[in-house]
Amino acid sequence: MDVFGLTNGRVSINVAWVQPYTNIMGKLELKEFHNEIILPGENKLYLAGHPPSEQGKRIFEPDLSIDENLCWVDKGGPGEQLSTTVLADRAVQLFLDLCQRANRGEIDTTSEYYRSFQRDWRESE
């Protein structure tokens, strides 16, 4: 699986090529996180085994356009065929929109570790 990610330290997007078997076409998964993720190649660990939870997911499947060029279709979208360049632009735009939502306070960016700590503290009272 090929993976890359984008993060600003508060929110993140992870993009992965998923191909479970070599004899079938794979798909591109774009996952949204409301916390920082560990980027591929970084030597870090999540505190106490609390990785951030996935908050949203978009799946793009490869297809052929009418002129037989590779294109991408959002599995949950309107069926619009996107070029690879447009798909890359869309992924970056989704990340920037996520950053703006976090900056406006529309999403909770509290870490999973801290949420777990708060939950355990309340249960012990």
Image (cartoon, rainbow, N blue to C red):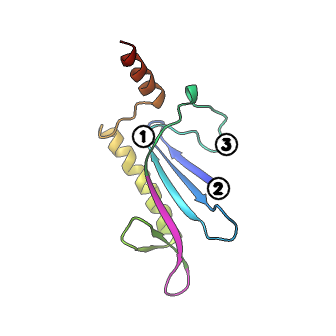
Q: How crowded is mark 3: few (under 14 residues within 10 Å), some or many (20 or more)?
A: few
Label 2 and label 3: CA atoms lie apart by 12 Å
Placement of 15 over or under 42, stated as above or below: below
Residue marked by disc 3? 41
The residue furthest bottom is 67
- Say which amino acid is labelled 1: His
Label 2 and label 1: CA atoms lie apart by 22 Å
Q: Are marks 2 and 3 in contact (CB under 8 Å)?
A: no
Tag 3's secondary structure?
Answer: loop
Residue marked by disc 1? 34
Is 82 on the left-hand or right-hand side of 38?
left
In the depicted view, which residue is nearer to us: 28 or 24?
A: 24
Tag 2's secondary structure?
Answer: strand
Which one is earlier in the sequence, the residue at label 3 or at label 1? 1
Placement of 74 over or under 8, stated as above or below: below
Question: Residue at coordinates 55% horizontally, 81% vertically from top-left?
Answer: 69
Marker disc for residue 2: 2
Label 3 and label 1: CA atoms lie apart by 21 Å
The secondary structure that dominates the magenta segment is: strand
Query: Looking at the picture, how far across and down is residue 46, in whole percent?
Result: 57, 31
Question: Residue at coordinates 60% horizontally, 66% vertically from top-left?
Answer: 26
Q: Which quadrant would residue 2 be assigned to in this image? A: bottom right
Total numbered badges shown on the rendered structure: 3
Question: Residue at coordinates 64% horizontally, 70% vertically from top-left?
Answer: 24
| Quadrant for the C terminus in the image | top left
- Say which amino acid is labelled 2: Asp
In the depicted view, which residue is nearer to us: 60 or 22?
A: 22
Q: Which quadrant would residue 120 be assigned to in this image? A: top left
| Quadrant for the N terminus in the image | bottom right
Q: Give the range drawn in magenta.
A: 57-69
Query: Looking at the picture, how far across and down is residue 74, in whole percent?
Result: 44, 67
Question: Residue at coordinates 39% horizontally, 35% vertically from top-left?
Answer: 109
